[in-house]
Image: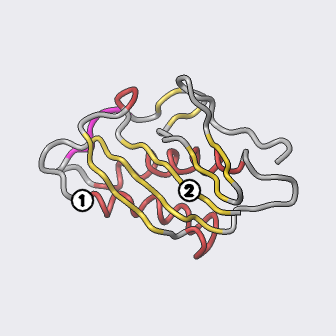
Amino acid sequence: MTGVRGPKPQGDYVPATRQGNLIFTSGMTPRKDGVLTKTGLVLRDAPLDIYSEAVELACANALAAARTMLRDGEKIKTIVALTVYMAAEPGFTAHAKLADFASAFLRTELGDSGIGSRAAIGVATLPGNAPVEIQLVAAT
């Protein structure tokens, strides 16, 4: 799509690829202008809403990367799959609730077609000490 810019890669990869009508994004962290807006582990006893902006920004970056693969006149029809990775401290168990911030963002952006299958995965660390990383599969 002409004029759409996605996030700048932080390594040797492309932000998104396309195969037929499917668009696969790389994992996106909560970066604005190349700088992480939040770092550190997701804490088990912290209120989840302190991570909402980071999750939404990572999701917005993934959606922006997907949109760079659109051809003129196309739009994203549906999110096929959403994967939300969280660098969480031991004992954190609210993975699904934290991932709901990404689902809510996609529903706001795309309506009910923004909700597809989803995985919410806890990991030890993420690139740059990001608390969250999001990867999408979208269909045109």
**Magenta highlight on residue 19:** no
Q: Residue furthest bottom?
A: 112
Residue 137 - label: 2
Residue 40 spot, x, y in % from top left: 30, 33
- Image height of 79 relative to 18, above or below: below
In the picture provided, is 102 more to the left or to the right than 88?
right
Residue 24 percent coordinates (x, y): 58, 49
Seen at 47% across and 58% down, the residue is 82
Identify the image quadrant of residue 117. Answer: bottom left
Residue sitting at x 32%, y 46%: 86
Image coordinates for residue 65, horizontal then vertical, percent: 64, 44
The amino acid type of the residue labelled 2 equals: Val
SS of the residue at dot 1? loop
Report how many numbered discs are placed on residues in the image.
Answer: 2
Amino acid at dot 1: Ala
Tell me the mark number nearer the camera, choosing from 2 and 1.
2
Q: The magenta stretch spans which residues?
A: 39-43
The reply, left or right, for residue 37 in relation to residue 22 is left
Q: Tell me the SS state at disc 2.
A: strand
Can you say which quadrant of the picture contains the C terminus?
Answer: bottom right
The chief SS type of the magenta part is: loop
Look at mark 1 in the image and give the residue it sits on: 94
Q: Residue at x 53, y 53 (%)?
A: 136
